[in-house]
Amino acid sequence: MKKGLALVFTILGAVGLVYGIFMLFNGEVTDSNPWIAAVLGVIFFTSGMGLMRSTGSSGGA
C-alpha cells in the first residue's frame, strides 16, 4: 500500500515538475500559473521519494 502510494506521488511529482518547468521556460501565457505546477511537483516528488526510502528497507534482512 505504501509503496504504491509512493510510486503514485513520485510519478505525479515528476509530471508536475516537468510540466511546470517546461511552461516556465517556454513562456506561453495560459490561464494557470506554471509556478504552482512546479512547486506542487517538487512537493509530491520529494514526498514520494521519502516514502519510497522509508518503506524500501522494511523488507527485512
Image: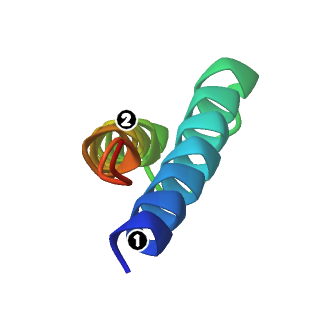
Residue 42 marker: 2
Amino acid type at mark 2: Val
**Circle number at residue 5:** 1
Which percent across, then down, holds residue 7?
52, 60
Q: Do the residues labelled 2 and 1 touch (CB within 8 Å)?
A: no
Q: Where is residue 15 in the image (x, y as percent from the top left)?
A: 63, 50
Q: Which residue is drawn at 42% across and 42% down?
A: 45
Q: Is mark 1 on a helix, strand or loop?
A: helix
Position of residue 9 measured from the top left corner of the image (x, y, whole percent): 43, 59
- Identity of the residue drawn at 65% across and 43% down: 19
Q: In this rendering, does residue 31 appear at all?
A: no
Q: Is mark 2 on a helix, strand or loop?
A: helix
Q: Residue furthest bottom?
A: 1
Specify the amino acid type for callout 1.
Leu
Q: Circle 2: is it few (<14), some (14-19), or many (20+) Cα within 10 Å?
A: many
Q: Foreground: 23 or 44? A: 44
The colour scheme of the drawn protein is: rainbow
Q: Which of 41 and 56 is in front in this view?
A: 56
Across the whole image, how many numbered discs are drawn on residues? 2
Establish if 21 lies above or below 48.
above
Question: Can residue 16 be seen from the camera position used here?
Answer: yes
Which numbered circle lies on residue 22? none
35 left or right of 30?
A: left
The quadrant in which residue 11 appears is: bottom right
Q: Which quadrant would the N terminus be assigned to in this image? A: bottom left
Where residue 17 appears, as percent x and y from the top left, is 54, 38
- First reached walking from the N terminus: tag 2 or tag 1: 1
User: Which of 49 and 18 lies nearest the eye of the viewer?
Assistant: 49
Residue 44 or residue 32, whichever sits in front? 44
**Which residue is drawn at the image coordinates 38% and 54% (left, top)?**
59
Q: In this view, does 56 lie above or below 8?
A: above
